[in-house]
Amino acid sequence: MTVPDEAERLLESERVMAHLGTCREGRPHVAPVWYRYEDGTVEIVTTGRKLANIRENPRVSLSIQADEGGDTRWMVTLLGTATVVEDEDETAEARRRINEKYDVRPEAYTENTLVRIDVGSATYRTY
């Protein structure tokens, strides 16, 4: 699936939080995550309930929105399939890229596991 150019620009443009939606045993779970988007793939590093849910059901959604003064500027919603990456070198590189995007110290979140999400569909809107 090709993400529209403007939606890609928005996803890559700012340090905004995404909300990851997962589902396990028919129960939805939504939680904030930092992410990095490039060429139709989202990278996150996570642990706990989010990771357990992805291992059981790899179908996920992401909602990303940028606001200014309480007003929405833009929003992007992605649906995709997640893959857990067990390779520590790949995880360390992804962690570095994400931490760099959010200007976080390099050693942050070293216990998390890399998840790559292949985007299947994208919707977006600017205001």
Image (cartoon, rainbow, N blue to C red):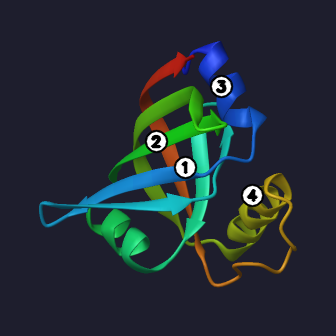
- Residue 40 circle label: none
Few, some or many residues within 10 Å of mark 1 (<14, 14–19, 20+) = many
Amino acid carrying mark 2 in the image = Ser
Sequence-earlier tag: 2 or 3: 3
Per the model, the C-alpha gap separating discs 2 and 4 is 17 Å
Confirm or deny contact between disc 2 and disc 1 (CB under 8 A).
Answer: yes
Residue named by callout 2 = 63
Residue 60 appears in the picture as rendered: yes
What is the quadrant of residue 62 in the picture? top left
Q: Amino acid at mark 3?
A: Glu
Disc 3 marks which residue? 8
Calculate the distance from the C-alpha at mark 2 to the C-alpha at mark 1. Answer: 6 Å
- At label 1, the amino acid type is Ala
Considering only order in the chain, which callout, 1 or 3, is on the residue closer to the N terminus? Answer: 3
Whether residues under marks 3 and 4 lie with C-beta atoms below 8 angstroms apart, the answer is: no
Residue 99 placement: quadrant: bottom right
Can you give x and y, in whole percent of width and height, for residue 34 in the image? 63, 58
Q: Earlier in the sequence, mark 3 or mark 4?
A: 3
Q: CA distance from mark 3 to mark 1?
A: 14 Å
Crowdedness of circle 3 by 10 Å Cα count: few (<14), some, many (20+)? some
Pick whichever of labels 2 and 1 is earlier in the sequence. 1
Q: How many marks?
A: 4
Marks 3 & 1, CB-CB < 8 Å contact: no
Provide the residue designation for mark 4: 98
Q: From the viewer's perspective, is the residue at label 3 or at label 1 nearer?
A: 1
